[in-house]
Image (spheres, rainbow, N blue to C red):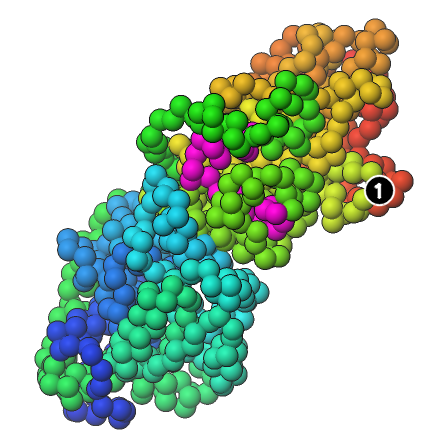
């Protein structure tokens, strides 16, 4: 017999016979009405678990990881307010059910079964996944997260206090709200979780408001690997900046009392707390998991004997809140109702086409208040002596700085965060003076942890801010890329556009830094970013374009709620000259504030018909150097600057090369997995023009004199162009 059926039959038999597990007497402020409501939530959670298995067996359900054994978290939901945002562990169905009881108009069994059935009418994911989540209940959806939701919970908690100081237009959380984030004991060991705990403690230690309740549901095992007894308490009971609470999750009275104490601490002190709840896990990890294959049967049966619903029946009886016979009736009625609802749910429509599945990858636009920008007086006060310098051509890093200043003046909800972005002004000085101009609330110097930087941004976006996090070097992103792929980019998809993560992530990257850093500070791989559905990847090649594209990127985030990565070529930050020393050929004047480069618009220099060179970033700079040599050799060329690397601006690129007799792709990313692969495919499919590519080698980058040896050079571009000219004749 399936373990779920065994637990079910045990419950029926033991309640009917009065064979209930022993434990402490019911104590605490949980009223009789609330206690019965918590029990009902647990019964519905249990019934849904059993029904999900039946649906999967019948081919009508598709994901069976359940919440049985964790029903006590319903008491945690009862201790919170429905406006307290909750990032939930995948075993927290009882929490969502209990919260639904706090909000009028909910049909929680129907809604959750729609999710189980992957119906397109599922109100949270639209049929894309079985997830917990509800916009009405302030529960952003999570999938099978292994702690990846913890950094953004830290960010969301920080955003509550930040919103008090600087009101974002689209603020979502009340000023007195707290954030709840739950996870399992095994997930607590993940490096992502440890980073979040450390960031919370680091923030609290400095008396910065962070109203966050971590909830660790400790069932003692992660799939088949046991957590050492006492490990969670030993690890978290004495952490600086993190108040520790613990309770027995099998006792809904104790759980409610301790959760209420922890919640009050967080809400009143505006400091983070760690609530350690002892639970059990019934049925194994998921539907396909058989616990008796890796645990002794006696141990499994002993765990089942401690069924939290059996404990609740005893506690309710001793408290005079509900007789066992009535509890059994509620349990049976709940099971019957779930079966009836499921029979109807499986008739509801499901997603069928790729277009239907992909409809939520791009988030919906939102209405933003119009702005005329800052006044002349405000700009003069912010820029000071820089106003006069705007009349002269400048290097890229300075033009980006000015663009950031104007954007932060115009949009108070824009907030920057990252290591060294504030007082130091960034590793390359790109954010110099911004700390003095806008203060530490909007120029946030973070600890050295890329996951926490991105989590802070994701969480602040949940409360109406437009974050602009900075990752110092492209190679550093790989420490934290799942925060972009697994969290920020997927949220619109799994919430059917109800939750979004608008932001502009600035990253200094690519290669060609002379004698500095090697592979860790020169990274020419962007494949991980181009592979993420819905992400926009922008890469300017000169300062004027950078300013105009940055304005468009902030518009895309602010108005269209898009996730944007702005890749800044480090080697071009200080570039002054193009063809000869002191010619100033790569500096540009600061563009007027109304000038932008729309998403998908490419740049074209020249009108030659012999050859079109298609490139971006440093490749555009090198190709412009090569252009004169080609002209001297009798080759009439044009140089196309892609600007937007993802999504590929296909129509604009095809139009830009129209009339050219040959196409040369110059790609500073790697031969395998680089941008050129997509361009080669595009021009093969859409043109009959001979085309070739020159790329970087499939190599890391060296320090010292060989810093550029593996990447395209002006000489290499010239040679490749002449080869293509000869081959095409």
Tell which of 576 and 433 is nearer to you. 433
User: Residue 354's x, y, as percent?
Assistant: 41, 37
Task: Report helix, strand or loop for mark 1.
Answer: loop
Residue 662 at x, y percent in the picture: 72, 14
Q: Which residue matches tag 1?
A: 515
> Is residue 455 toward the left or the right of residue 400 in the image?
left
Q: In this picture, is 139 found above or below 653?
A: below
The quarter of the image holding the N terminus is bottom left
Q: Quadrant of the C terminus?
A: top right
State the extent of the magenta-drawn residues as a range: 403-423
Residue at 27%, 48% (x, y): give it. 123
| Crowd around label 1: few <14 · some 14–19 · many ≥20 (10 Å) | few
Of the pair 251 and 569, the residue shown nearer to us? 569
Horizontal side of 696 relative to 454 (left or right) equals right
Identify the residue shown where x is 13% and y is 70%: 333
Q: Quadrant of residue 176?
A: bottom left
Furthest-right residue in this view: 705
**Lateral position of residue 355 relative to residue 452, left or right:** left
Whether the magenta-drawn stretch holds residue 407 is answered as yes
Q: Does the rendering let one see residue 60?
A: no
Seen in the image, is 618 located left or right of residue 713?
left
Q: How many marks?
A: 1
- Say whether residue 621 is magenta: no
Quarter of the image where one finds residue 609 = top right
Is residue 448 depicted above or below 271 in this figure?
A: above
Q: Residue at x 29, y 52 (%)?
A: 174
Where does residue 719 sit, x and y in percent of width and height? 85, 21
At 51% across and 63% down in the image, what residue appears? 206
Front one among 638 and 724: 638
């Amino acid at each position: 017999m399936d373990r779920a059926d065994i637990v079910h039959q045990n419950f029926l038999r033991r309640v009917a016979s009065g064979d209930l597990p022993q434990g402490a007497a019911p104590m605490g402020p949980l009223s009789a009405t609330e206690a019965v409501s918590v029990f009902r939530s647990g019964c519905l959670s249990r019934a849904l678990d059993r029904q999900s298995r039946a649906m999967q067996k019948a081919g009508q359900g598709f994901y069976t990881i359940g919440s049985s054994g964790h029903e006590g978290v319903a008491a945690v939901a009862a201790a919170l307010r429905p406006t307290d945002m909750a990032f939930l562990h995948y075993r927290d169905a009882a929490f969502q059910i209990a919260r639904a009881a706090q909000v009028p108009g909910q049909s929680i069994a129907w809604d959750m079964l729609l999710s189980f059935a992957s119906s397109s009418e599922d109100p949270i994911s639209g049929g894309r996944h079985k997830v917990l989540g509800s916009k009405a209940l302030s529960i952003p959806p999570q999938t099978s997260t292994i702690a990846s939701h913890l950094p953004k919970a830290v960010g969301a908690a920080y955003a509550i206090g930040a919103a008090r100081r600087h009101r974002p237009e689209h603020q979502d959380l009340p000023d007195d709200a707290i954030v709840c984030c739950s996870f399992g004991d095994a997930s607590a060991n993940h490096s992502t979780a440890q980073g979040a705990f450390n960031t919370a403690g680091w923030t609290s230690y400095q008396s910065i408001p962070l109203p966050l309740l971590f909830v660790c549901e400790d069932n003692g095992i992660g799939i088949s690997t046991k957590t050492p007894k006492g490990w969670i308490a030993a690890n978290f009971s004495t952490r600086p900046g993190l108040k520790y609470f613990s309770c027995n999750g099998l006792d809904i009275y104790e759980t409610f009392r301790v959760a209420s104490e922890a919640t009050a601490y967080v809400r009143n002190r505006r400091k983070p707390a760690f609530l350690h709840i002892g639970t059990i896990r019934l049925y194994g990890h998921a539907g396909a998991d058989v616990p008796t294959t890796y645990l002794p049967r006696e141990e499994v049966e002993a765990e089942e004997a401690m069924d939290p619903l059996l404990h609740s029946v005893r506690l309710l009886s001793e408290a005079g809140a509900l007789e066992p016979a009535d509890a059994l009736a509620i349990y049976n009625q709940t099971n019957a109702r779930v079966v009836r609802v499921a029979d109807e749910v499986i008739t509801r429509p499901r997603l069928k086409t790729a277009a239907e599945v992909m409809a939520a990858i791009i988030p919906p636009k939102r209405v933003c208040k119009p702005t005329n920008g800052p006044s002349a007086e405000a700009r003069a006060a912010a820029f000071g002596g820089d106003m006069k310098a705007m009349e002269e051509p400048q290097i890229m890093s300075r033009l980006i700085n000015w663009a950031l200043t104007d954007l932060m003046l115009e949009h108070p909800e824009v907030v920057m965060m990252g290591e060294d972005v504030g007082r130091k002004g960034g590793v390359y000085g790109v954010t110099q003076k911004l700390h003095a101009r806008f203060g530490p609330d909007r120029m946030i110097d973070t600890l050295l942890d890329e996951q926490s930087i991105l989590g802070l941004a994701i969480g602040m976006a949940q409360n109406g801010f437009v974050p602009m996090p900075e990752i110092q070097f492209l190679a550093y992103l790989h420490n934290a890329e799942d925060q972009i792929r697994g969290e920020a980019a997927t949220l619109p998809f799994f919430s059917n556009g109800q939750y979004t993560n608008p932001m502009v992530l600035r990253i200094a990257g690519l290669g060609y830094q002379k004698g500095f850093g090697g592979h860790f500070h020169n990274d020419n791989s962007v494949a991980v970013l181009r592979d993420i559905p819905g992400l926009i990847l922008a890469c300017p090649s000169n300062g004027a374009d950078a300013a105009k594209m940055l304005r468009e990127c902030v518009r895309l985030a602010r108005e269209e709620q898009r996730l944007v990565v702005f890749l800044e070529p480090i080697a071009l930050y200080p570039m002054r000259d193009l063809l000869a020393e002191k010619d100033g050929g790569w500096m540009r004047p600061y563009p007027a504030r109304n000038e932008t480069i729309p998403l998908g618009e490419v740049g074209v220099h020249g009108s030659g018909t012999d050859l079109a060179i298609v490139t971006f970033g440093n490749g555009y700079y090198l190709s412009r150097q090569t252009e004169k040599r080609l002209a001297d050799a009798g080759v009439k060329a044009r140089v196309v600057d892609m600007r937007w690397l993802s999504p590929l601006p296909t129509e604009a690129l095809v139009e830009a090369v129209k009339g050219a007799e040959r196409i040369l792709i110059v790609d500073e990313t790697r031969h395998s997995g680089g941008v050129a692969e997509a361009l080669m495919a595009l021009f093969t499919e859409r043109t009959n023009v001979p085309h070739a590519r020159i790329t970087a080698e499939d190599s890391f980058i060296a320090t010292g004199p060989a810093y550029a040896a593996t990447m395209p050079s002006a000489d290499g571009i010239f040679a490749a162009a002449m080869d293509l000219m000869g081959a095409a004749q």
